[in-house]
Amino acid sequence: MTDANGKQIPRRTWFLERLWTKAMDWLLLAVFGAIVAVVFEPVRDRAVAIWDSPQALGQIDAKIDTISARQAALAADVRRLKQPEAVFEMSTFNTAPVRGYCVEGQPCQIRVRLRRLEAALSCRIVRGSIQWGFINPRSDSFVGARRLDQPSGRNMGPTWEDVEITLMTPTGLEPEADFTFEAFYTNCPGTEPDEDPISFNSPRDRFTIFPTQAAADAARSNP
C-alpha cells in the first residue's frame, strides 16, 4: 500500500491513516450539521408562524367578535333593567265621563286624573303619540277613539292633575267598555337617544256606553 506520494507504507499505518481521515470527516459532518440545525430551527419556526398567521389571526378576530357581541348584549340588558315599569299613574276612581256615560257616535267629555311617577320624570312624551280608545271586555278587542280637542303636549309632574279630553265615542262598543290609552315616550332612564320611543298603557277604567237610540229614549223618559 502506498501513501499520497506513491511510497510503500505498512498496512497497519495505512489503516490508521484511513481511520483518522474518516473520523475527521464524520466530526466535520457532525459540526456542520449542528451549525445548520442551530441556524435553521428559528427560521423554520418563523416560517411556520408566518404560514399559520392568517388562520391564527382569524381565530383571534372571531373571539374578539364573540366577546364584543356578548358585551353589547349585556349592556342592552343592563339598560333595560334601568327602564321604568310605568311612566304615569291614572286614578280609575276619579277618571270618568263628565256626564257619567258616553254615547256611541257622539262626542264624550272625559275627566282623567293623572300624575307622573318619580322614576320616570326624565321621560318626554312624543307629541301627538297618545292613542285613545276602548276595550270591549267580552271580546277583549280594542276600538280606537279620535280626540276632538287640541292636546297640550306638555309633560306632567308628580302631583295629581285632572285633564279633560273630548273623544268621539266609536260605535260597536259593549254597554260597558273599558276606557284606556297608550302613550309613547323618549329620554326615559335606560334608553339611548337614537332608540325608538317606548310605550306605556294606562289601566282600564269601566265606562257606561249608550247606543244612540237608547240615549234618545233615556232623554225622552227623563225630561
Image (cartoon, rainbow, N blue to C red):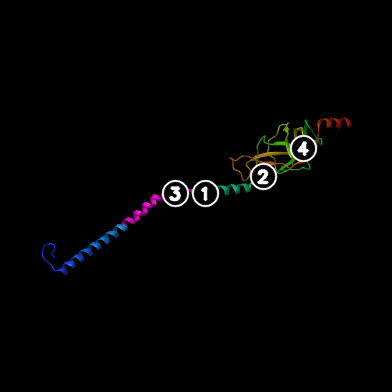
Which marked residue is nearer to the observer: mark 1 or mark 2? 1
Q: Nearer the viewer, mark 4 or mark 1?
A: 1
Q: Give the residue displayed 19% in from the left and 65% down from the top.
A: 18
Q: Which residue is mark 1?
A: 66
Q: Which residues are magenta?
A: 39-68
Of marks 1 and 3, which one's residue comes earlier in the chain?
Answer: 3
The residue to which callout 4 is attached is 111
Counting residues from the start of the chain, the first of labels 4 and 2 encountered is 4
Q: Amino acid at mark 2?
A: Ala
Q: Mark 3 and 4 residues: CB-CB less than 8 Å, in contact? A: no
In space, the residues marked 4 and 2 are separated at their CA atoms by 23 Å
Q: Whole-percent x and y of residue 96?
A: 78, 38
Eye-nearest disc, 3 or 4: 3
Which of 213 and 51 lies nearest the eye of the viewer?
51
Q: Give me the C-alpha separation between circle 4 and circle 1.
A: 53 Å
Graded by Cα atoms within 10 Å as few (under 14), some (14 to 19) or many (20 or more), the crowding at tag 3 reads: few
Q: On the image, which quarter does residue 102 sit in?
A: top right
Considering the numbered disc 4 on the image, is that residue within a helix, a strand or a loop?
Answer: strand
Secondary structure beneath dot 1 equals helix
